[in-house]
Image: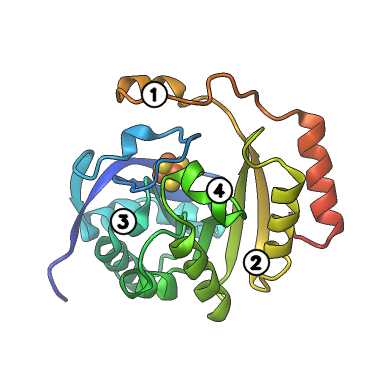
Amino acid sequence: MKAPVSGRIHSIETCGMVDGPGLRFIAFLQGCPLRCLYCHNPDSWKRGGGREMDAQELVDEAWKYRSWMQASGGGITLSGGEPLFQPDFVLDIIRRAHKKGMTVALDTSGFGRLQDTQACLDEADLILLDIKTPLENEHKNLTGIRADQPRATLEYLKNINKPLWVRHVVVPGLTDSRESLDALKAILLNIPSMEKFEFLPFHKMGEEKWAEEGVDYSLTDTPQPDKSFMDGIREEFAKAGIPL
Ligand code: SF4
């Protein structure tokens, strides 16, 4: 086998329970080209930050936890940052994990040119896709990048029938309008391979990190969505047949 590809890691969590099925070994990869207004990990943005690790080292680290991963139906999750910012690293991790019998979920915004990311999308066992906004003209304002690449990624994932868990953050004043929710529902109802959908309420837990990074945080005055509002839209989407 070729020499392992090196990449940059922000941090590792060894017993994750929400980023894929079962118990997860979660590697948060360093580097993200997006600038989501609600990001709670701005310290993961810089490409050269974090620490270097090679794909085999990461898989060997995950292998130490194989007994509880296997017993729970879990596996490795590659999150970020944006893991598809380091597609060669991600692909090497997936292939080395598969050789050891471990599955890999990829937690992504859908960033990246398909010619760079396609093999990762093909070979990951599950994609956790964060739809930032269903409104294409709002995408750049919310995330700093246009909607083209995330939309192309979603279309590709639909074409290959890839198992998908989709997530969407509800931010008052940004993603909670009737227009936005209706557009989101229409997109979700047209993803046959989606196994699960989750609404996540906006929170400000990362606000202090923005100051530490020396970047202005624009959502200081934005409230968290009401519980009754969240319950209402979950019920509405479930009634429409969306698997929550
Ligand atoms: S994609 Fe994730 S890490 Fe990147 S800016 Fe958005 S929320 Fe932050």
Disc 1 is placed on an element classified as loop
Q: Are marks 3 and 4 in contact (CB under 8 Å)?
A: no
Q: Residues within 10 Å of mark 3 (few under 14, many from 20)?
A: many
* Residue found at x 32% / y 71%: 95
The residue to which callout 3 is attached is: 85
**Mark earlier in primary sequence (1, 2):** 2
The residue to which callout 4 is attached is: 138
The figure's colour scheme reads: rainbow
Q: Nearer the viewer, mark 2 or mark 3?
A: 3
The residue type indicated by label 4 comes to: Glu
**Mark earlier in primary sequence (2, 3):** 3
Vertical side of 140 occupied by 156: above or below: below
The residue to which callout 1 is attached is: 216
Between 176 and 138, the residue placed more toward the observer is 138
**Mark earlier in primary sequence (4, 2):** 4
The residue to which callout 2 is attached is: 194
